Amino acid sequence: MITAGGAVAGCGAGQAPIPVVGKAPADLILDPGGLPTGFTPSPLTVDQLVAADAASLKAAANTTIVPEQCRPTADAALQPQLSGTDAAVLAATSGTGTLVELVTTAERDIAADVVATTGRCARTETTIVDGNMAGTRVTTEYTTLDDPDLAEHRDAVERMHLVASAITTTLPDGGRQSRISYAGYALVQRPGKNVVTVQLTVSGEPTAATAPDAAAPAARAPMPAEDFVVLFGDAVRAAADRS
């Protein structure tokens, strides 16, 4: 989900961009030298991220979700607004997962993320209805994480949401895989009343598939949840820095 900078800022869906004051998104990304132990930067451009997201959204169109009102919408709304002129991305991999940070002048609908991962939507079941993987069921259980301690940078955050996802995939033959992932989203105000979206995901590697109808295996988290919270705090502080 990085290596591009920009000079225009999106004010939200359907609104004309306004000039960015101060640093571009590429200047607001985490320092690759400060990545968690075991994570190594890997090449990823904004265009590559947009293409990958578009493929995921296309695949999601061939699914049903229960409850139906829990179908995510924030990615679909944000993705068309992203380009190498208004976003920056950083990617890294380790033996346990993949990290992607996105900073963009387009505003993510974090309220929609909250709706899609809490309350009645804290547990969802998605079923693939078409293609080679038809019949695959993906059960996701969301847990809201605590906000990071941002100290003097807290006032710069307009909205923030962090969530852990425990994902169990039941394959058409009855085999099961498990995976744990984290996601954090924030709207951060910059000088000149410009707002940037900070988005950080750390996705764990899926377990090997079990034999048909065996119990789902325990997944290995890509990092402790508390470490993700600290890392997301670092990302927000980097974006909020006035220097």
Image (cartoon, grey):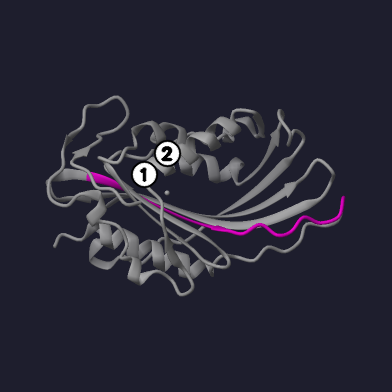
Q: Residue at x 27, y 61 (%)?
A: 238
Q: Residue at x 41, y 55 (%)?
A: 43
Residue 28 among those drawn in magenta: no
Find residue 50 and name its label: 2
In space, the residues marked 1 and 2 are separated at their CA atoms by 6 Å
Q: Label 2 amino acid?
A: Val
In-front residue for pair 177/66: 177
Q: Is residue 117 visible?
A: yes
Query: If the image is split into quadrants, where does the C terminus sit?
Result: bottom left
Q: Residue at x 17, y 52 (%)?
A: 23
Q: Label 1 amino acid?
A: Val
Task: Tell me: residue 182, above or below residue 37.
Answer: above
Element class at badge 1: helix
Residue 206 among those drawn in magenta: yes
In-front residue for pair 136/84: 84
Q: Position of residue 103 (x, y in %)?
A: 32, 49
Taking the image as shown, residue 217 lies to the left or right of residue 239, namely right
Report the residue marked by disc 1.
46
Quarter location, residue 149: bottom left
Is there a contact, CB below 8 Å, between mark 1 and mark 2? yes
Span highlighted in magenta in the image: 195-213
Task: Tell me: residue 146, above or below residue 52.
Answer: below
Element class at badge 2: helix
Q: Position of residue 77 (x, y in %)?
A: 41, 32
Furthest residue in direction top, as rendered: 14
Q: Residue at x 28, y 62 (%)?
A: 237
Find residue 202 and name its label: none
